[in-house]
Amino acid sequence: MQKIILDCDPGHDDAFAIMLACSHFNVLGITTVGGNGYLPNVTRNALQVLEVLGKTEIPVYPGHAGPAIQELTIADNVHGSSGMDGPHLPEPTISAQSEHAVDFIVRSAMNEEDLILIATGPLTNIAAALHRQPEIAQRIRALYFMGGGAYCGNWTPAAEFNIWVDPEAAYTVFHSKMPLYMAGVNLTRQCPVLKEDIETIRSFGNQTGKFAAELLDFFAKDGDAHLHDACAVAWVVDPSLVKDAFLHVDVELNGTLTRGMTVTDLRVLQSADCEKDLDLDSLKRWNDAPEDSPFRGLQPNTHVGMRLDFNRFRQLLFSTLQACR
Ligand code: BDR
Ligand code: CA
């Protein structure tokens, strides 16, 4: 089984990321980061999800409470004051580890072969691990993360929440030379929570299905919710679910309107057909473009998720939840 570490800030959609990860991978640990909620809350939420799943052997390592250079912004308008409002769960009976998430990530990346990191919160812990031990960029197989967007934001017109919370951390990651797979909002908005799916999940009748349906009752109460973080994990479970393009991505740190934007060089994908915006189906790739072309764009550093097979994603989610306890 593929070994992974999931760095997250649960978070309703992070909870679904945990469910998928624990069902399909050898999860060496879950690390938590301040983001959707304050660190003690998101850590408690991670422990609670593991208890529901009966996966209490998976260790949870709390990490950074917030970014190094700015105040933490939390998303309590989306996830409620607990970070995971909705289901009424008892306090967890298991406890978090005393080792810091960053120490755990560095230790694991240096000792394990073929490790995949998946991040579904602000990139604060991952950047701190890179600062501590830059070699981990070469040691890990890949970092899949939910964050950014190829051409749009959600928290601001330009910036997606996870990157907005800690743009400097994201900058470190994009400049690290780690193999990067970005599940940005342009991809994850292709997986909306459908009311009928909540009832399907509830009808499974198991403990996890009941919990998942209650999470979605709260999360989708305003009618516009997406399982962003689950997409990043599903991409690792079944790479054929996502069509990606290998592109240059960098993070804007200074823009007055665009701080936290993942500026994605889409020039190589521009279509000759003005009815079409981007030509994902052409075989045109950065490597094929003439070197002296002014429209070739910058050298790619990130596999950017562009198209999600939503129906197959739902099937994966349903079959996974149904098989849980
Ligand atoms: C991201 O922000 C959080 O609210 C979600 O958990 C997800 O990771 C979407 O922008
Ligand atoms: Ca998240």
Image (cartoon, grey):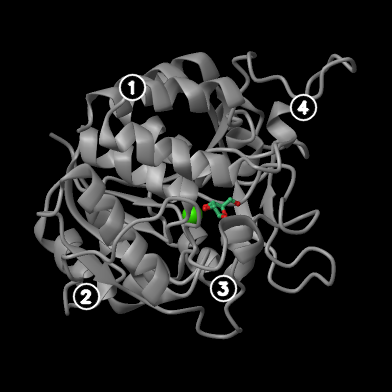
Mark 3 or mark 4: whose residue is earlier in sequence: 3
Disc 3: residue Cβ within 8 A of ligand 1's nearest atom: no
Residue at (16%, 65%) from the top-left corner? 94
Instruction: State the separation of the CA atoms marked 4 and 2.
Output: 42 Å
Mark 1 or mark 2: whose residue is earlier in sequence: 2
Residue indicated by mark 3: 168
Mark 4 or mark 2: whose residue is earlier in sequence: 2
Position of residue 196 in the picture relative to residue 159 (left or right): left
Q: Is residue 183 visible?
A: no
Amino acid on which the number 3 mark rests in the picture? Glu
Crowding at mark 2 (Cα within 10 Å: few <14, some 14-19, many 20+): some
Which image quarter holds the N terminus? top left
Residue indicated by mark 4: 270
Residue indicated by mark 1: 204
Instruction: State the separation of the CA atoms marked 1 and 3.
Output: 42 Å
Residue at (31%, 25%) from the top-left corner? 205
Residue indicated by mark 2: 103
Crowding at mark 3 (Cα within 10 Å: few <14, some 14-19, many 20+): many
In the foreground, 205 or 112? 205
Crowding at mark 4 (Cα within 10 Å: few <14, some 14-19, many 20+): some
Residue at (25%, 47%) from the top-left corner? 52
Residue at (47%, 55%) from the top-left corner? 11
Instruction: State the separation of the CA atoms marked 1 and 2.
Output: 39 Å
Label 3: which secondary element: helix
Mark 2 or mark 3: whose residue is earlier in sequence: 2
- Report the mark closest to the observer, 1 or 2: 1
